[in-house]
Each structure stands twice: as structure tokens, then as C-alpha cells.
Amino acid sequence: GSAAGALEQLIAALCIHLGAESLVSRLVVPTENAPAPEVVSALLPGALDARPRAFSEIQDSLRRWLLAQVVREAEQALQSDPPEGAALERRSPCMQLLASLVQELLARASLCGHHRDAPNVALVRVAEDLLLGADEMLRKRLAPAATEAELARRQAQLSTTFVGSLVPWLIDSLALFSAFAFEYAQRLLPLVLPLLNTLKAVLGA
């Protein structure tokens, strides 16, 4: 009803606001100076009756929520007509937030002196989430395209989702970080290869 619509608008506005903030990557990067659970709980409206939670737990929940949202949006895209015109350039507020977050993580990770530094750890974790999410969603939702027309429609449907835009850009960007090439390959290749096989099966890529 109207309450659900208002909540959806509030979440969208919050995503856009956070995505425009500097240091947006703090939403997922572990920190040694995190506020105590009691402090975080005291900042929330009392009506939420929220239990005290460690800041790292909140960060993990937010990361998982963002992934769940973009996966849901991709699933909806597969049930809708392919975007046309201006819609090809449009991204959901959740996608905008996730893209801003990943872009800043990439910049911060490029300055890391060790692959276990917090920004780099967070970047790899987000990359793992996106690769796993893309592979699982495609395998569950899609059968191999039977015709060229169906293949073209499917590719167009996915073009504005995290599968068609964010994941390819992220993989290309990670390849630029030669300082941690071995660590990236060790962690991410076991996830990239199944995704490529899935894409080959369902998209003819």
C-alpha cells in the first residue's frame, strides 16, 4: 500500500544520498575505530527496538542487502521488456549506491600496501558477492536461449543490471591492480570461471 511505497521512496532517496557521499566505502570497509554496539543502538529510533549489534555485523548486513536488491532487480529485468532509449542509461538507486561504493573501493585498494589491508579485503569480498550472485541468479532463472531473437532479448534485458554493467566493469578494473594480481586471481578465478561457463550456456557468450 501507500506505506510500502513511501518506504521504497525513502530507501531510494537514502541510496542516492549515500552514493553521493565521500568515503561511501566506509559502509563496508572494516575499521578499528568502529563505535560500540550500544552507541550505534542509541542512535536508532526507539520504535525500531533494535538490539545492539557490532558495527561489522551491520556492515555485513548492508553488503548482503545490496546484493539481494540488485539480484532481485536483475530477476525483474528478465521478466520485463528490454530497456530502450533513455532507459538504457538509467540505473536504480541501489545500483548507483553499489557502483559508487565499488568505484571508491577500487581507488582506495589501489593505494593499499598489502593485500590484507582493510579496503582491499572489502573490495575482494564485494567482488566475490557479485560474482557468486550473478552466477547463481543466471543458473536458477535462465535456460539456454533457443533462438537468436531470444538471445538478443536476454542480452538486452541484462544490459542495465549488475550482471551486464557492474560485473564486467569490476573485473576489468581488478585486472589493473598488478600489485595484487596473484591474490586476486587466487580468490576470484574460482568464481569467474563458473560464471563464464554459465554465461556461455545461457547467453551464447
Image: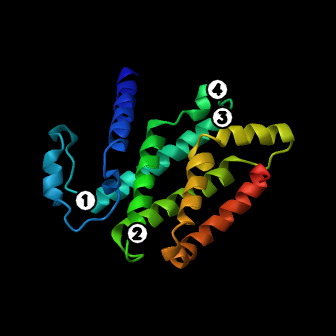
Q: Quadrant of the N terminus?
A: top left
173 sits to left or right of 58 = right
Q: Residue at x 67, y 67 (%)?
A: 193
Q: Which residue is mark 4?
A: 85
Q: Secondary structure at mark 2?
A: helix
Residue at image position (59%, 36%) is: 76
Query: Do labels 1 and 3 touch, CB within 8 Å?
Result: no
| Above/below status of 100 relative to 11 | below
In three-dimensional space, the C-alpha distance between marks 1 and 3, rounded to whole angstroms, equals: 37 Å
Sequence-wise first label, 1 or 3: 1
Quadrant containing the C terminus in the rendered view: bottom right
Q: Position of residue 184 (x, y in %)?
A: 53, 72
CA gap, disc 4 to disc 2? 38 Å
Under mark 3, the amino acid is Gln
Label 4, label 1: how far apart the Cα atoms are = 42 Å
Neighbour tally class for label 3: few under 14, some 14-19, many 20 plus, Cα within 10 Å: few
**Amino acid type of disc 4?**
Gly
Residue, disc 3: 79
- Three-letter amino acid code at disc 2? Val
Q: Earlier in the sequence, mark 2 or mark 1?
A: 1
Label 4 residue SS: helix
Task: Say left or right for 54 vs 66.
Answer: left
Q: Which one is in front in this view, the residue at disc 4 or the one at disc 2?
A: 4
